[in-house]
Amino acid sequence: MSGLRSWIARRLLLGVAQTVAVVLLVFVLTEALPGDAAVAFAGDQPDPERIAAVREAMGLARPAHIRLGEWVGGLLHGDFGTSLASGRPVSGFLADGFGPTVLLATVTVLLLVPVGVGLGVLAARREGRFTDRLISSATLGVYAVPEFALGVLLVTVFALRLGWFPPTAVGYGTDLLAHPAALVLPVLVLLARPVCSLSRLVRAGMIDALAAPYTAHAQRYGIPGFRVRYAHALPNALAPATQQLARTVDWLLCGVVVVEALFVIPGLGTVLMNAVADRDIPVVQGLAVVFGLATVVLNLGADLVTHRLAPRSGVAA
């Protein structure tokens, strides 16, 4: 138990260090963005006095280390700053885009886990047979299609030609749960590539686990095949797949810009695109910090789950 506690403590300390690095990196990168936000906000053909006044009002005239200290102090109190373009708190932008993005991510993950794991286990049980070749070929082919191309294809066929689903989420606002038809095509696009990668990882892990000595030993003891597959082999096969699942959830929560832009979904990806176009630095910084923290937390959680599933595998070491 002491070894497990020591391992968890090390991972948590690493997570804190990664969080600090994310905050510093976000500030440095946004400071290094080309152009001048004051010039952009001063209007067309601004005079130097106007630019200087805007810089003073935006706080850009202060030294960078002072602005960094104030920004970090605000983050520690849950204050992400104020939008330069609208004067709204950055937390308001996060709240506006958080709902649609989390809804898309939740629905996608709820479908991803059973479909991806189920296809991987089915392919592993039929290794070398027609079912295995069919699943492997289909997942490889679908994975090779970019999200925007698959999205355009689905919209063309199922929305424009057949009229089964709406082509975009325009007119539905942020309450997409009340309009499930608007979620079908975006979720299919988001689901396509993660299902392929997860199922292939589970297949490979399941084949290795079924060929491992402990599996043969369990069979010699007369343990039923169902229990050998799902109580002994599957947890070890899921250990590497857990890391992939964490990266997928992180990708989903961080706002899939292409999918949200294609289907006009007002999620975090759309908020980020608008903020970059407006050179709204506080919003960009706030979103980047949230995305970075989500990555750190999800990877820590994946390490803990992996360590629990296969503590001797060394995957999460």
Image (cartoon, rainbow, N blue to C red):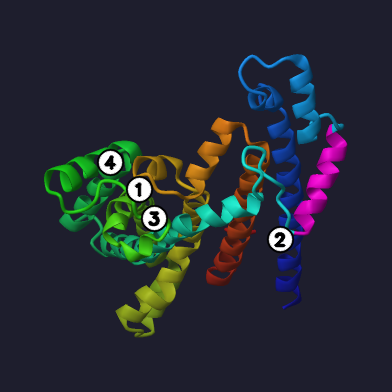
Compare residues 139 and 316 and report the one nearer the observer.
139
Amino acid at the residue labelled 3 = Leu
| 188 to the left or right of 5 | left
First along the sequence among labels 3 and 4: 4
Amino acid at the residue labelled 2 = Arg
Numbered label attached to residue 11: 2
Question: In front of the other: label 3 or label 1?
Answer: 1
Determine the residue positioned at 25% across, 46% down.
167
Q: Which residue is mark 1?
A: 193
First along the sequence among labels 3 and 2: 2
Label 3: few (<14), some (14–19) or many (≥20) C-alpha neighbours in 10 Å: many
Q: Which residue is mark 3?
A: 198
Q: Is residue 314 visible?
A: no
Quadrant assignment, res 51: top right
First along the sequence among labels 4 and 2: 2
Q: Which residues are magenta?
A: 64-77
Q: CA distance from mark 3 to mark 1?
A: 9 Å
Q: CA distance from mark 1 to mark 4?
A: 10 Å
Q: Secondary structure at mark 3?
A: helix
